[in-house]
Image: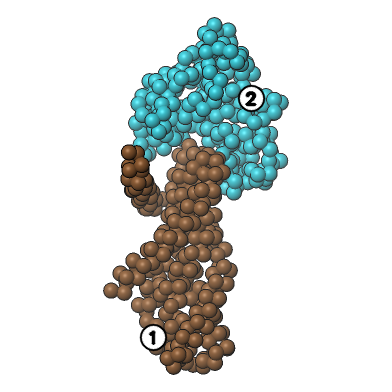
Chain colours: A brown, B cyan
Amino acid sequence: MSWILTPFKIIGNFAHTFIRESGRMVCFLTTAFFWVLFPPYLLRRIVKQINFIGVKTTLVIVLTGSFTGMVLALQTYYALVKFGAETSLGPVVALSLIRELGPVIAALMVAGRAGSALTAEIGIMRISEQIDALDAMALNPYKYLIIPNLLAGIISLPLLNAIFVVVGVWGGYAVGVGLTGVSSGTYFGGIRDFVDAKDILEGLYKSLSFGLLITWISCYKGYFTGYGAEGVSKATTQAVVLSSVTILIWDYFMTSILLT
Amino acid sequence: MIEVVDLYKSFNNHEVLRGVNLKIEKGQTLALIGGSGKGKSVLLKLIIGLTKPDRGKILINNQDISKLRGKLLKQLKQRFGIVFQGGALFDSLTVFDNVAFPLKEKTRMKESQIRDTALAELARVGLSDAESKYPAEISGGMKKRVALARCLVMKPEIVLFDEPTTGLDPLIGKAIHKLIRDCQKSLNFTALMVTHEIPAIFSLVDRVAMLYNGKIIASGTPEEIETSQDPVIHQFVHGELEGPIPIQ
């Protein structure tokens, strides 16, 4: 008889865990934003975290951005040639990068590099009682650990996205103009004609929300990590997987909202 | 003065503390002994307000810390200091910055004053030459001393020690005990020390309390505890394998 109930138990457990975790995550974020309103504002820590999340990810963004632009130009060119529309290469590359690939790939890179490190750092602070030490000193751990990371994520992601897009467009230019023979004027002229401020804003909104999502998930997983090295390693993996999946799901919903 | 009244705390339906009653007079040092994983550290965290009890009172100078929130809790916490089991030093800060951290964050002292105070505290624990090192570069004994300096730099009225000599060799352990005793004498703080250092600790503290099955089963002078005929206390204090305490 118990085998009949097993699937229901599994579904029930999953639903219970999902609802509980979601509730805790929302409470965590709400608490953090509540404390944003009160001093001290710890600007130095925010700048330090912008350096960690943003500046130190720049090289990865430049590399992935340039190659994404290059491969996008190459694939798009051979598709457009079939319709005799190779002059549209510039706008297709730019719009793909600005509206979709820039925000998403930049966010995935940040989740992999900075998000995992954030979870591990906060997790180690938790298991080595450093967070308790802050609390025992009557210092708010949210102010010292969570808020600077959330703000740094929100500030850094749009900037990284901008770098990704610019480098990607130039990567596309290198392939499109340098290899396939599209003229420079056609490439940039098309971009100027077809890319609107609305497209740039779409990318900006996405990267802002991804910045918050990554740092929120990473900080949450680190703050409530399990015991010992295994707990931290599990939390780090979960943070990266959950951030990446959430970025893609959220991207779909944002796109559908912003396009309507 | 600290007074714990009928304190209960459970985690995941497992009752760790089942009606703890404990009293520590002002300026006194009390050693809390008991089996590993039986709730001693939980009791420390409850006393300092890091976690809330399910039931019961924790009175600090007649103020119930478990009922306090926000600013009042913050003010009360400022009268405490705690030395965690592993030191809980901030990895990203140097020894000096660790000690200066509470001063920078919680006082309006000038840079020069902060420097002098932190260095004086480091000198008190004998670590003047380690100020620029990071926690990863110093030994376990040094970490405990830095943790003690960081704790004392705010001149707390009550200091809690969570196994301050765990993982140290007997000589360093003895030196740490002496250091704690000297600091206690000079600063006259009230101290609660969770420890397994039996019988070494008996010569250093004013009173000893034993936690067993989630309750304080005995509290008295070190001599009273050491010579107790209670089978549980006798077995624990003398480290005997045979007796009422099951070996797990």
Q: Looking at the image, is mark 2 or mark 1 nearer the viewer?
A: 1
Above/below status of A180 relative to A23: below
Subunit ID for the residue under disc 2:
B
Rounded to the nearest angstrom, the CA distance separating label 2 from label 1 is: 75 Å
Residue B237 or B192: which is nearer the viewer?
B237
Above/below status of A128 relative to A215: above
Residue B31 seen anywhere in this rendered image of the structure: no
* Residue marked by disc 1: A194
Residue A194 pos. (x, y %): 39, 86
Few, some or many C-alpha atoms within 10 Å of disc 2 (few <14, some 14-19, many ≥20)? Answer: many
Above/below status of A155 relative to B18: below
Residue B117 pos. (x, y %): 60, 39
Few, some or many C-alpha atoms within 10 Å of disc 1 (few <14, some 14-19, many ≥20)? Answer: some
Quadrant in which the N terminus of chain A is drawn: top left
Residue type at mark 2: give it: His
Quadrant in which the C terminus of chain A is drawn: bottom left
Residue A124 pos. (x, y %): 55, 45
**Element carrying mark 2:** helix
Residue shown at 71% from the left, 26% from the top: B171
Residue A197 or A119: which is nearer the viewer?
A119
Residue type at mark 1: give it: Phe
Residue shown at 39% from the left, 25% from the top: B8
Residue shown at 54% from the left, 48% from the top: A233
* Image disc number at residue B177: 2
